[in-house]
Amino acid sequence: METSKNTLTSRQSDILHFIHAHIEQLGYPPTLREIAQKMNIRGISAVRKHLDALVRKGHLIRRKGARALDADSLLPATVPVPVLGRVVAGIPVNAAENRLDTIAIDPSWIPPGPVFLLRVKGDSMKQAAILDGDYVLVRAKETAEEEAIVVAEIDGETTVKRLRRKDGRLVLAPENPDYNDIPVHENSAFRIVGTVCGVFRPFSGGSR
């Protein structure tokens, strides 16, 4: 359901990013068939519906012709990304906080799909260049590859760690030798909230 003119669904956001990347890399937009193949969409009519929504929401211009899409000139200078709270890089604590703020970010830094920011507290990820007070940009998703840096909930608490498998068992691993791995037991209430895809650091002197 469309909640506002400018709100994009995850699929629409993915399509818009693909169009922009295609134009940036090759100098011309993709065809509807190329979009369908890339996005695993069955049927050109379904692609047209997504493009119509992007046009209606002001993110795309369509002209006549197979490659008559213009997304580049309509990309915003910045995109407001919500800050949802704090995440602990240390011993996990309950971090279920509501939306606190938004930060404007260059759209070229944002991956396809829904994203949000979390403020980091603690130093367990310092060897991955994630420091206390940093903001991590998180792509919301429920799966992750091993070795990815993830935001995860375990037994009702939230932390940012590297996802690893040791001795056949998943662990949430710190990037600081002063901290221990957090094992994911079979009876643990565990879920991946998202994968970390960027880090933003306030200037020195900013409030932490």
Image (cartoon, grey):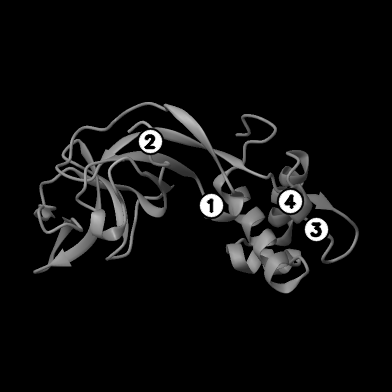
Residue at image point 73% right, 67% down: 30
Which quarter of the figure is the N terminus placed in? Answer: top right
Q: Which residue is mark 3?
A: 69
Task: Answer above or below: position of 162 versus 98.
Answer: below
Q: What is the secondary structure assignment of the residue under circle 1?
A: loop
Q: Amino acid at mark 3?
A: Leu
Residue at image point 51% right, 36% down: 103
Q: Residues within 10 Å of mark 2 (few under 14, many from 20)?
A: few
- Taking the image as shown, residue 113 lies to the left or right of residue 15, namely left
Q: Are marks 3 and 4 in contact (CB under 8 Å)?
A: yes
Is any atom of residue 71 visible in this view?
no
- The answer for how far apart the CA atoms under marks 3 and 4 are is 9 Å
Q: Quadrant of residue 4?
A: top right
Q: Are marks 3 and 2 in contact (CB under 8 Å)?
A: no
Residue 68 position, x and y percent, is: 84, 61
- Taking the image as shown, residue 179 lies to the left or right of residue 60, namely left
Residue at image point 42% right, 26% down: 100
Q: Which residue is mark 1?
A: 110
Q: Between tags 2 and 1, which lies in front?
A: 2
